[in-house]
Image (cartoon, rainbow, N blue to C red):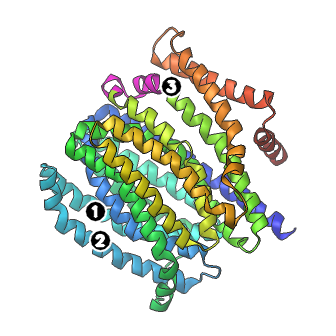
Amino acid sequence: MSAETEMKGKIVKGLFWKLLENGGAQGLQFVVAILLARLLTPAEYGLVGIVMIFITLANAIVQNGFSTALIQKKNSDETDFSSVFYFGLALAAAMYAVLYLAAPAIAGFYENPILCRILRVLGLVLFPGSVISVQTAYVSRKMEFRGLFIATMCAVAVSGTVSIAMAYRGFGAWAMVGQQIAYYLALMLCLLAVVSWKPRLLFSLARIRGMLAFGWKLLAASLLDTLFNNLYGLIIGKIYNEELLGAYNRGDQFPKLIVSNLGAAIQAVLLPAFSSRQDDMGQVRAMVRRAIRVSSFLVLPMLFGLFAVADTLVLALLGEKWLICVPYLRIMCISYSFWPIHITNLQAINALGRSDVFLKLEVLKKTVSLIGLLIGIRYSPILMVSIKAVCDFLSVFINAWPNRKLLGYSIASQWRDILPSFLLSMLMCAAVYFLQFALPGGPWLKLMVQVAAGMAVYAGLAWAFRLETFRYLADTFRNRG
């Protein structure tokens, strides 16, 4: 078996397990979220949403940078992994101390005393989170995604059971706190059981410094990205109220569920694949192009379809009290449409060791986003989030620009690969949206008919127009069978 064939087999196998892990875990999380939405109010969701913004920012510092450096480095060994493990725990302790001391001020800023207690309790997830980042880096490096699938499914089942039980017994917002803590602890313990790597008594400050040279730029870029992504929630929670923040978070959750499934799979599998071929630009370019074509073909119809069924979906799954989230849901469908393309371009840049380019791109994108935010904040949350979607669309061009020179894969070439799936998704979206006005019955019946019609229309159009990606996927599954 040739090295190229072996690598292709590893990529296909890794992508299969990663998609299964994300799809299965998020499918369960989706069910749990629906049940929690029935038991909790938008205001309770918004309350924990405020705290999660600060936890996410702290996690970005603890988890990012070094984990990517472990994957990108050609010869990562036990000393590298163990050194990052201990350094990450120390960093988690430092960040938890910052959160603990800042909690009263944050609660005072939002004029809600309970935020102090929630933040101090929820901040404990930083410790298992730092461990998990090293474990998942090892999984990606060795492509042991089967073990990650098992661990993630167990963690989701445990945390879902805990949160639903707490919500049913009237714990309110604390049910979501329990869900997060249970998830992180269960995932860490399960990974210790199923993944072959275990921390050893090894530490090298020189190795940390070496990885820091690459990782600090990714850390800075990740922190900048995380800050801006959560800035909208911070502003909505402060200027408006927790109920509106809950609506925004719920509207964001549905499309994010779709893109994070495929996007995380692309990120976890393609970075080590790209890194292993970083000396052969032709192979990296071919893999990037295939990833963009496939991700566009799969993600665009799902998000455009979700845009079309937003009203009936929310009524069927969450109830009338959550209709307030529909406008945000539709805006975020547009915002996330090209996210897998962002990831593929950025992972190629990371694999080539150009974290300096990665950081420059983030600074440029966030400058554009800040201008949009300053414009939108003067008017309404709907307009503010709409401008965010426009900025995210512009980011597609920004992320793609360096690969014109690095890989010989221009923006125009990328859009030629994306355009067929984009146009078919638009046609399908229009058909599904207007179908709801002709359908009788309640929201559940309408939702099932709309989803079935959308799948049939998109698949039929792809077959009729003989899309290359459609034929590629069909041949791939046929050959595997």
Mark in front: 1 vs 3:
3
Mark in front: 2 vs 1:
2
- N-terminal label among 3 and 2: 2
- For the residues labelled 1 and 3, the Cα–Cα distance comes to 36 Å
The image quadrant where one finds the N terminus is bottom right
Q: Is residue 145 visible?
A: no
- Residue on which the image places disc 2: 95
Crowding near the residue tagged with mark 1, few <14, some 14–19, many ≥20 C-alpha atoms within 10 Å = many
Badge 2 vs badge 1, beta-carbon distance below 8 Å:
yes
Boundaries of the magenta span: 310-323
Check disc 2 and report its element: helix, strand or loop: helix
The structure residue drawn at horizontal position 68% and vertical position 60%, both measured from the top left corner, is: 404
Dot 2 amino acid type: Met
Residue 224: percent from left, percent from top: 40, 62
- Residue on which the image places disc 1: 123
- Residue on which the image places disc 3: 309
Residue 408's place in the image compared with 291, above or below, is: below
- N-terminal label among 1 and 3: 1
Look at the magenta stretch and give its main secondary structure: helix
